[in-house]
Amino acid sequence: MKKKALFTTASIFALSAITPAVSAAVEDTMKYEDAQVGFYNVKTGKVLSSDSFVYLSTSEKVQILTNQFFYFADGQGGAIQAVHLLEAETDEIMISKIVEQMTVENEFNVRLTADGRVIFLSKEDVLNSLQEAIDKAKEQLEQLTDEQKKAVEAAIKEAEALLKDVNASIDDLNKALKKLEDAIKGANTVDPSVKAAQDAVKLAQQTLKKEDIEKAKQLVSNLKDGAIKDELQNILNGLSSPTIDLSDLDDLIKEARNIISNAAHLYTPESLKSLELAIQKANIVRQQYDGKDLTTEAQQVITRETNDLRIVIDQLVKAEELTFTPTEETKKNAPLFLDPVVTKLDDQQKNSGGVLGLDIGVLELGLLSASQISQISENNRFHIDVKKGTTLDATSSVAIHTVLGGHAFQVFVLKQNEEGDYINVDTYKGSSGGALGITVSTKIDMNTLEEGSYEIILSVKEGLSVVQVIPFKLINLVEKDFNQVATEDSRVSGNVLLGQNLGQDDNLIVTDIREKSAGTSQSIGINGTEIQGKYGQLQINKNGTYNYMPKSDRAIVGKVELFEFTMKDTADNRTAKGTLEIQLGEVAGK
C-alpha cells in the first residue's frame, strides 16, 4: 500500500460535524481495477460519486453512513465500510478499518469498476440488480424523448428476456445490466436540457458565484423529475449558502401585533407599551438580517431576539376586569307630589224662568246630542269645562219663588263623550220654595267632576202655580289641580361613573345607553344624548353626568325607571355594562 493520505471526511465528505478527520494509506498488492472514488452499495449496486455525496443533506448522508452495505472506495485500491466513517473516534481507529478493495469484492462476490459500477459475480445478486435496474429504467421513460425511449425500451426488453432465461450466464446478465445502464446514461446525456443543466452545475461548482448558482438552479428546475435532476439538485443545495431562518421571529411578531390589535383590553397599558417597544426592536433586527447569509453569529442574534419577544409576550400583565358597582349615583329616587293645588272659584248664577225649552222626558232618556242641548234655555244650564289633570267640586243651589208651597226640581249632570254627545252621569232631585212667598234655597253637593266637558241642567216640575224667577247657582266651586305631580323638585341628577373601578387614570366614559326594555342602544355624542324612558326623559353625557325628569303623571307613582349603559376604559378598551335605576316615589305634601 502507498503510505500517503488518500481521503479525509473533512475534505472529501464535508462531514466534520459528525466524523473525525482521518487519513489512510493503502498499498497496492494486486492488479485489481481500482474503482472510481465514491460510495458503493455491494447489495443493491447503487453508486454515489464523491461530488454527489458531498452535497447531500445531513440526514441523507447519515442514511448512507449507517448502511452496512455501503463501502467507500478511495480510487487507489482502498475501501472502508461507511459505518466506520461515522463511528471511528480517532485517526488510528479509522486507519485500522481500511481494507483492500479486493477484500470487499471477494467477500460479497462483486467487482467495483473504474467507471463507477458494481458488477455482481453471483447469479442471484446480478438477477436482483438487473430487476432493480429495469424498474428504475421504466420510471424514467416519461422523462425521455421518443428516440431516447426506443433505445432504453430495447435494453429493457433484452434484460427482461434474460431474466426469464434460466440458462442465462452471469456474464450475459452483467452485460445486459451494463447495456441498460449505458442506455439510460446515454439518453440522459443526449438530452440538450440535461447537458445544459449539467454544464451549468459544473460551472457553479468551479466559480461559486451567486449568478452562476442561480442560473444552474433555473436550468435544473426545468428538468423532468428523476435521478439526474435529484443528483444535480443535491449538488446545488450544497453550493447555495443558506440564509437566516426568520420564520419563528416572523410568527412571533405577527402574534404580538394581533395582541395589540385585538386583545389589548385584556392587558395593562404598561405591559402593552413594553410589547410595542419589543415589536419595534424585533422589526429592526429582522430588517437588518433579512436575506443575509447564515452564520452562527447571525442566527444567534435572531434566536436571542425571538426569545426576548416571547418573554415579553409571556410576561404581559392581565388587566383587572372592569366591573360595574351600583352606587348612590346609579340608584336615585325622583319625588312625586300627589297633593293637588286647590283653588276656590267664583260662584256662578243663572236666573231660570222655569221654562226648560225641551221635553223633560227627552232629558230623562240620558243621552242628548249637542243639537238637543242647544235647545235648552241657557238660563237653565251651566256649561262647565274641567281641565286635564284637574277635578272640580261644586254645590248646586236652587231657590224657587212661588205664591204657593214647595216646588220639586231636578238637576241633571251630563258629560260629553268622544262623539260629541252628552250622557247623563248624575241626577239630583230636590224641592224648593215656601208658603206665602217665602223663598227657601235648596243646596245639593254634587259628586266630584273629573276632567271633561259638562252640562248641568235645572228642570222644574210643571203644573204648579205661577213660578217666579228661579235663582240657579253653582256655589262652593273648588278646583284641584293634579298636574304638578312632577316639579323641579322631582328632577334627579348625578354621575353614573362616580365610584366605579377607574384604575390609575380617569379614562372611563359612557359610550351608549338604552331604556332597559328597548332593543337597541343610542350612542352618546360629544354634546350628550337625550333618551326617552318609560316614565320620563334622561339626558346623559360621555363623562357620566346625567339628569332625569319624570312625567307629571299620577299613574307613574311607584314605578321604577331603568336605563342600561356601557362604560369603557379608553386606556385599554375594557368595557362593562351598568344600570341606572330611578325610583318614582310619592312625597306626602309639598
Image (cartoon, rainbow, N blue to C red):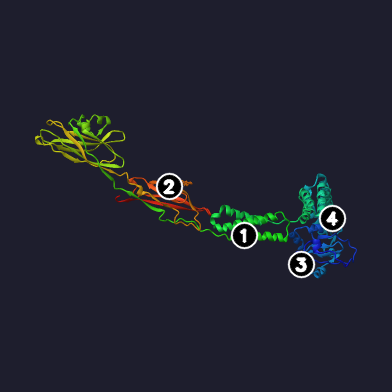
Mark in front: 1 vs 4: 1
Q: CA distance from mark 3 to mark 2?
A: 86 Å
- Distance from Cα at disc 1 to Cα at disc 3: 39 Å
Residue 164 is at least partly visible in this image? no
User: How far apart are the alpha carbons under marks 2 and 4?
Assistant: 103 Å
| Amino acid tagged 3 | Glu
Q: Which residue is mark 2?
A: 539
Q: Quadrant of residue 403?
A: top left
Q: For the point 27% across and 31% down, which residue is it? A: 370
Residue at left 72%, top 61%? 296
Q: Nearer the viewer, mark 1 or mark 2?
A: 2
Label 3 residue SS: helix
Q: Quadrant of the N terminus?
A: bottom right
Alpha carbons under labels 1 and 2: distance apart: 48 Å
Most extreme residue toward the left is 436
Residue at which label 4 appears: 173
Q: Earlier in the sequence, mark 3 or mark 2?
A: 3
CA–CA distance in space, label 3 to label 4: 36 Å
Residue 310's tag is 1
C-beta proximity under 8 Å, tags 1 and 2 = no
In primary-sequence order, the first of circles 1 and 3 is 3
Question: Between marks 1 and 4, how big is the CA–CA gap?
Answer: 64 Å
Residue 586 position within the rendered picture, expressed as x and y whole percent measured from the top left: 32, 50
Earlier in the chain: of badge 2 and badge 4, it is: 4
Residue nearer the viewer, 38 or 281 = 281
State the SS at label 4.
helix
Disc 3: which residue: 87
Which amino acid type is marked by label 2?
Gln
Q: Name, please, the residue furthest toward the right.
A: 31
Q: Nearer the viewer, mark 3 or mark 4?
A: 3
